[in-house]
Amino acid sequence: MTEVLSNARPEKLVAATAEATRKPAGDAASQAPQGPRRRLGPGRSLPFGRLIGPALLIAVWWAASAFGYLDPRILSGPGSVLSTTADLVSSGRLQDNVLISLQRAGLGLFFGVAAGVILAVAAGLSRSGEYLFDGTLQVKRAIPSLAMLPLLILWLGIGEQMKVTVIALGVAVSMYINTYASLTSIDSRYVELAEGLELSRWQFIRKVVVPGSLPGFFVGLRLGVTSSWLGLIVVEQINATKGIGYMMFQAQQYAQSDVIIVGLVAYGIFGFASDAAVRAIERRVLSWRRTLAG
C-alpha cells in the first residue's frame, strides 16, 4: 500500500482526495430521509363534511333544551319541533305550504336565470349591448329588490305575479354580474386564436365563450338560488294565503315558536339542498378544472 502511494503522481492523489471528499456529501444529501411533504391546500374533503356544522348546532340546541337552559316560550326544543312537524305533516298543512313556496321560488329562479344570462351575453359580447344594459344593471345592483316592493305592488298588485317578479329580479342581478364578469375576463389571446383559426361566430361561442363563462355562471347560479329563498321569505308575508312564510307569519301572531322553527328549518333544508345540487352539477360540468375545492 505504501509503495502504491509513493509511486502515485501527486496530481492524481489530489484529484482522488477531492473526489472522495465530495462523494460522501452528495450521497448523504441524496440518501438523507425526507420528511412528509407539507400540504398547503385545505386537505381532502369528506362526503358529508358540510353537515358537520349544522349537526353540531342541533346538538347544542338539543343539549341546551334538555338541561333547561332554553325557555320553551321563547324557543321550543327539538322534541317539540319534531312533534309539531309530525302534526303539520299528518294534517297536510306543511306539504301544501311547501309546494306553493317551491313553485314561487322555482318560477322566480327560472325567469331570473334566463334574464340574467341573456343580458350578460348581450353585454359581454357586444359593445352596444354593454352600453345599453351594463350601466342600468349596475344601478339596479345598488338598489335592493325588496326596496322596489312598493313600486311593484303599485304596478302588479299583490298577487303571485308580483311575488315571482321580486324573486326574479334578485336572481337576475346575481346571474348578470357574475356571468358578465366571467365573459369579460376571458383571455384575449383565445379570441385572437379563434380569429386566426377563422372560427365562425357559433364556433367561437361554443368553444371559447361557453367554457370561459361557465365558472362565473355557476357562481351566479349559487348566489341566485340563495337570492330566490331570501326574496321568497319576504314576499310570502305580504298578503299571502299559502306558503311557508305565511305559515310562519300566522304562527307569530299566536306565539307558536315551534311552528316558526319548522318554517325556518324548511327554508334552511331547501336552501342547503339546492346549493348542494348546484355544487354537484358544477363539479361534474367543470371536472376539467383542478381547484382547491376539488
Image (tube, rainbow, N blue to C red):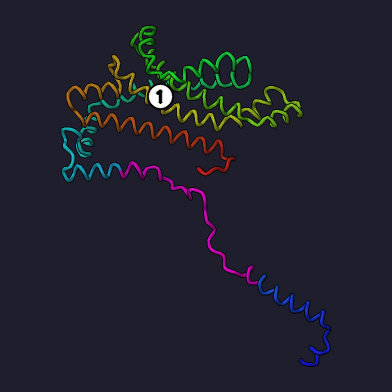
Determine which quarter of the picture holds residue 76. Answer: top left
- Badge 1: residue crowd in 10 Å (few <14, some 14–19, many ≥20): many
Q: Quadrant of residue 88?
A: top left
Question: Height in image: 258 above or below 12?
Answer: above
Residue 285 location in percent, x, y?
Answer: 55, 35
Q: Amino acid at mark 1?
A: Ser
* Magenta region, residue range: 27-56
Q: Secondary structure at mark 1?
A: helix
Along the line of sight, the residue nearer the viewer: 71 or 246: 71
**Which residue lies at the image location 48% right of the left edge and 48% below the top edge?**
42
Q: Is residue 70 above or below residue 26?
A: above
Is 197 situated above or below 153?
below
Q: Position of residue 241 (x, y in %)?
A: 27, 16
- The reply to whether residue 285 is in sight is yes
Q: What residue sits 18% from the left and 44% below the top?
A: 66
Residue 129 at what x, y percent from top left? 60, 15
The verdict on residue 163 being magenta is: no
Which residue appears at 78% of the width and 79% of the height? 14
Say how many tags the image has. Answer: 1
Quadrant where the N terminus is found in the figure: bottom right
Could you tell me which residue is drawn at 33 percent across and 30 percent down? 267
Above or below, comparing residue 228 to residue 239 in the picture: below
Which residue is the site of mark 1? 228
